[in-house]
Amino acid sequence: MKKYHKILSGLILMTLILIVASPLRLKAKDVDSLFNVANILYNETKYDEAREIFLEITRSNESNSLSDQSHYMAGMTYLSQENYQSAIEKFMELYNKKGSTKQPEALWGLGNAYVALKEFNRAKYYLNRLIVFFPENSLYPQVKAKLTEIEEKVKSSK
């Protein structure tokens, strides 16, 4: 376990050096490495550190292959920390971003943030948009289940 933490600490240090010393545009291999480190940090519940890296990837080059995924994951870090308003802002930015490849995921994030805030009508609005506009998306079964869960919560609160 200590060996793993040393490796992780080394990766974090390397990542921070890359961020500070990097030019405005990161190279593809750097982006992949940074994204992997950010995911490790996210999975280790080190959300602030992960978010900084995800946002750096997004800022470094809006057109890199992981930009939209990093934007989504930045929103997920906020959602995981129960900072729902910031999560909503990130997901809304991503949803409204022209050419975004992660609009369905942004809608999913918005729905979950509004469920957590108990704003069920807004949650249903965004989740239903995902179903209507992205019926072939892999999130479809989860969205249907979430909508059923919302309906049950609404019924039980009456």
Image: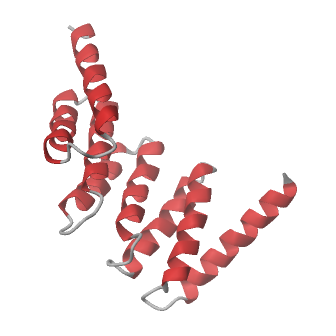
On the image, the x and y values in percent for residue 99 come to 20, 69
Occupied quadrant, residue 115: top left
Q: Residue furthest bottom?
A: 23
Instruction: Indicate left or right for 28 with 146 as reference.
Output: right
Residue at 27 percent of width and 39 percent of height: 111
Residue at 18 percent of width and 69 percent of height: 98
On the image, the x and y values in percent for residue 73 come to 43, 56
Of residues 133 and 146, the one nearer the viewer is: 133
Instruction: Indicate left or right for 42 with 57 as reference.
Output: right
On the image, the x and y values in percent for residue 140 come to 28, 38
Instruction: Indicate left or right for 97 with 146 as reference.
Output: left
Q: In the picture shown, does residue 95 fall above or below 117?
A: below
Occupied quadrant, residue 63: bottom left
Q: In the picture shown, does residue 30 fall above or below 108?
A: below
Instruction: Indicate left or right for 7 with 34 as reference.
Output: right
Q: Residue furthest right?
A: 2
On the image, the x and y values in percent for residue 154 come to 22, 16
Residue at 22 percent of width and 57 percent of height: 95
Protein image colouring: secondary structure
Number of on-image labels: 0
Of residues 110 and 65, the one nearer the viewer is: 65
Q: Quadrant of the C terminus?
A: top left
Residue at 48 percent of width and 92 percent of height: 23
Q: In the picture shown, does residue 146 fall above or below 5?
A: above
